[in-house]
Image (cartoon, rainbow, N blue to C red):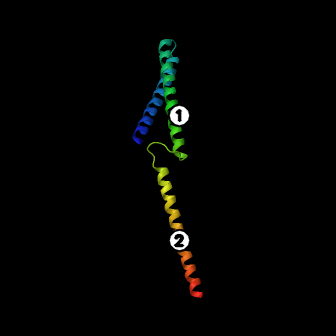
Amino acid sequence: MANERLRVLEDVEKEIAMVLQCAGNTVLELSKDKHNASFLDRQLLQFQNSINRVESELNAQICYLTQVATGQPHEGSTYSARKDCQMALNRAEYAKVKLGELGRTCEAMLEQQ
């Protein structure tokens, strides 16, 4: 799952490079005295498609990270279960300490009598 997410982010990075390349090609073509309109149209279409893919994938990644960061259950995560287990161990340790204190208090009271 993590490898898949990293692969998707690498693809997004490649799309961003494609966006920059399209923008550069467009500026280069526009700097010419006589520019090719069909080339500019193709570059514009490729630019728009790449931008849409980048936006879509980044939104999906942000939604995923929002789920992970808020502790909501999601596929492949053990964070919530590990957190619950650690909290249960902490409560058990606290109960053990308090029972020990109660036992010592009871023994002290019995010795006074």
Give how far across and how far down residue 90 sits, in percent.
51, 63
- The amino acid marked with disc number 1 is Asn
- The amino acid marked with disc number 2 is Val
Marks 2 and 1: which is nearer the front?
A: 2
Give how far across and how far down residue 41 sits, in percent.
50, 15
Give how far across and how far down residue 51 sits, in percent.
51, 27
* Residue pictured at 53% horizontal, 38% vertical: 63
Q: Quadrant of residue 14?
A: top left
> Which residue, given by chain and number where applicable, does mark 2 sit on?
97
Q: Residue at the far left: name it.
A: 3
Foreground: 34 or 49?
Answer: 49
The answer to whether 87 is drawn above or below residue 39 in the figure is below
* Residue pictured at 55% horizontal, 71% vertical: 98
SS category of the residue bearing label 1: helix
Foreground: 55 or 84?
Answer: 84
* Residue pictured at 41% horizontal, 41% vertical: 1
* Residue at mark 2 to residue at mark 1: CA–CA distance: 48 Å
Q: Which mark is residue 93?
A: none
Q: Classify 10 Å Cα crowding around label 1: few (below 14), some (14-19), many (20 and above).
A: few
Give how far across and how far down residue 102 sits, in percent.
56, 75
> Which residue, given by chain and number where applicable, does mark 1 sit on?
59
The answer to whether 3 is drawn above or below residue 84 in the figure is above
